[in-house]
Amino acid sequence: MIVKFWGVRGSIPTTAQWARVHGGNTPCVEVRCDDAVFICDAGTGIRELGRDLRRRSPAPKAAHLFLSHLHLDHVQGLPFFLAAVPDLRVHVYGVSDDDTSRRRLLSGELGAEFFPQNSSEPRASLTFDHLEEDARNVSGVRVRSFPLQHPGGCHGFSFECDGRKVVYASDVDLEAGAAGGKERTATGDVLTLRSVPRALLNAARGADLLIVDGQFNDAQYRAHMGSGHSSCLTATDLAIQADVKNLALFHHDPDDRDSDVDAKVRLCLARASKLGADLPIFAAREGVALKF
């Protein structure tokens, strides 16, 4: 299983020099298992993914696109992607209670009133599918969706293949609807792990990689409560409770410099150490590929 980050920034892309290390494109993550291509979200990062797919030999004939929700930063790259891979069949999956709304919103995003396009130019074909929260086999990969606490609704996804598991939870307020903190003894002290949402905790259990919203530090989270995003320190507690093997902080704040993102990683590593957890933690970085 291969995971590659094509877009890691939240809310709006940035081209600032101080964001070059981690990248400024909005969310897009590729998960590959054998020849199957799975894409999580269609932010601006998906444009470069499309170019890369076209260069591959052999080029894939189909891709499976999983949309966590329809906020603009998660779909704004789709028109450019479809133009980049005209021979590709794109199967779009969502968990919206109203599939008609999802189709209409995507059609609006791709419509001429939002994005000029030449009808004579070839583009990838789209099919739409409703994804239930139960596990489902998609091209030999076990895919499961689960609800996330985010304004307007949002879902995360887990992918299991060849004994490996990757979990994607891009936009989530981990302290909203959380239940059940847990005591942990470390270096002689009894500390309390923060409570986290049960559905996400269960979905993330034992994951080889958890990709999760870590946009804020604690002070920033308190200043932005209700925005639907999380403190990186609560994300760390989630990963520890779920016995995750690797934690990737994701959905970086558009105003964060690379140094700010790195500072969050240091905070999380310090907390994990204090809790007695040997947990690899890193900030998702555009262009980085991981193999599991």
Image (cartoon, rainbow, N blue to C red):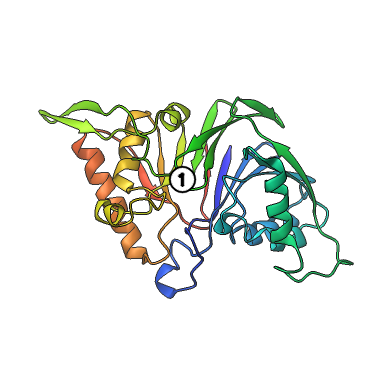
Quadrant assignment, res 271: top left
Foreground residue, 85 or 9? Answer: 9
Residue placed at 43% from the left, 74% from the top?
A: 17
Q: Percent from the top left, x then y, of residue 249?
A: 40, 48
The answer to whether 82 appears left or right of 14 in the picture is right
The answer to whether 108 appears left or right of 147 in the picture is right
The answer to whether 142 appears left or right of 148 in the picture is right
Q: Which residue is mark 1?
A: 150
Q: Percent from the top left, x then y, of residue 252?
A: 42, 57
Residue placed at 52% from the left, 43% from the top?
A: 153
Q: Name the amino acid type tagged 1.
A: His
The answer to whether 167 appears left or right of 189 in the picture is right
- The quadrant of the image that shows the N terminus is top right
Identify the element where label 1 is drawn.
loop
Residue placed at 38% from the left, 49% from the top?
A: 214
Q: Residue furthest bottom?
A: 17
Q: Percent from the top left, x then y, of residue 190?
A: 14, 28
| Residue 65 makes an appearance in the image | yes
Tally of numbered tags: 1
Say few, some or many: other residues with alpha carbon within 10 Å of mark 1 (under 14 / 14 to 19 / 20 or more). some
The answer to whether residue 178 is above or below residue 59 is above
Foreground residue, 121 or 152? Answer: 152
| Residue 35 makes an appearance in the image | no
Q: Percent from the top left, x then y, of residue 43?
A: 59, 57
Q: Residue furthest right?
A: 120
Quadrant assignment, res 136: top right
The answer to whether residue 63 is above or below residue 223 is above
